[in-house]
Amino acid sequence: MTVPELPTKGSAIIVVDPLNDFMSWRGKLWPLICKVSKQVGTIENLHRVVSAGRESGIPIVYAPHRRYKKGQFSDRKYLHPSHIGIKSFRVFAEGKFGGQFFGSLSPQKGDLISSPHACSSGFAGTDLDAQLKGAGITHLIIIGYTSNTCVEATARSAVDLDYHVTLVTDAVATWTPADHHAAVAVNYGFLGQKVVTTEELLQVVGGMRAKC
């Protein structure tokens, strides 16, 4: 894999759906996603990428999922399977533990938080593009949950919107090893301009820090 070239100014780290229902052992989805998360070290690598970004002055941008509340899908003609699951099990419930940001990866002062997405892409129906363009961001490093749904959809939208996209193979996770492999080993290569590991990314981010 080729280490990406990232501008000191104009880069941002997009953290997709770092919510308790995905990441906490108390989360409703953790039993379904913990196998891949543990195998690839997703949570540790998310911390490493975000921490390195903060130290280097790279903006951290959160692209959270819409929190569930009663009647949320009444305006939709066609429910996606994820909508059905969210509605059935009250995933990411508004005002509840599962819908809160995972403690150690919660937004900090100065971070950007987009309006929440309703299905997959962090850009669809949100102000994410407007916030990024307003901040002069051109290069995105996309990490979070899940490898083959929201992360992949957000990357697809970003490319369509003319951003330079870097995807990180071990700072994402999804439901099964097969799903994860299909995303990071097959699909990502057709999506982002760069596909790297956390270690490879940190080499670049560390160099950016040295220049500051």
Image (cartoon, rainbow, N blue to C red):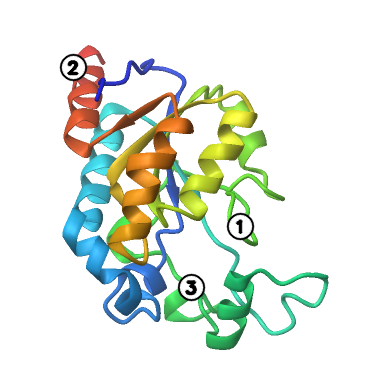
Q: Earlier in the sequence, mark 3 or mark 1?
A: 3
Q: Can you give x and y, in whole percent of width and height, for residue 46 in the image?
A: 27, 49
In-front residue for pair 39/12: 39
Which numbered disc, 1 or 2, marks the residue closer to the eye? 1
Is 12 displayed left or right of 113 in the figure?
left
Which secondary structure lies at badge 3? helix
Query: Looking at the image, do the residues carrying marks 3 and 1 touch, with CB atoms under 8 Å apart?
Result: no
Which kind of residue does numbered mark 3 sit on?
Gly
Q: Residue drawn at (34%, 54%), measured in percent from left and top? A: 180
Q: Residue drawn at (74%, 75%), measured in percent from left and top? A: 73
Split into 4 quadrants, where in the image is the N terminus? top left
Crowd around label 2: few <14 · some 14–19 · many ≥20 (10 Å): few
Q: Earlier in the sequence, mark 1 or mark 2?
A: 1
Query: Looking at the image, do the residues carrying marks 1 and 2 touch, with CB atoms under 8 Å apart?
Result: no
Q: Which residue is mark 3?
A: 99
The dot on residue 116 is: 1
Which numbered disc, 2 or 3, marks the residue closer to the eye? 3
In-front residue for pair 81/52: 81
**Alpha-carbon span between mark 1 and mark 2:** 34 Å
- Residue situated furthest top in the rendering: 211
Q: Which residue is mark 2?
A: 210
Which kind of residue does numbered mark 2 sit on?
Ala
Q: Can you give x and y, in whole percent of width and height, for residue 140 in the image?
A: 45, 31
Q: Does 103 sit above or below residue 192?
A: below
Q: Earlier in the sequence, mark 2 or mark 3?
A: 3
Which kind of residue does numbered mark 1 sit on?
Pro
Q: Residue drawn at (30%, 36%), measured in percent from left and top? A: 54
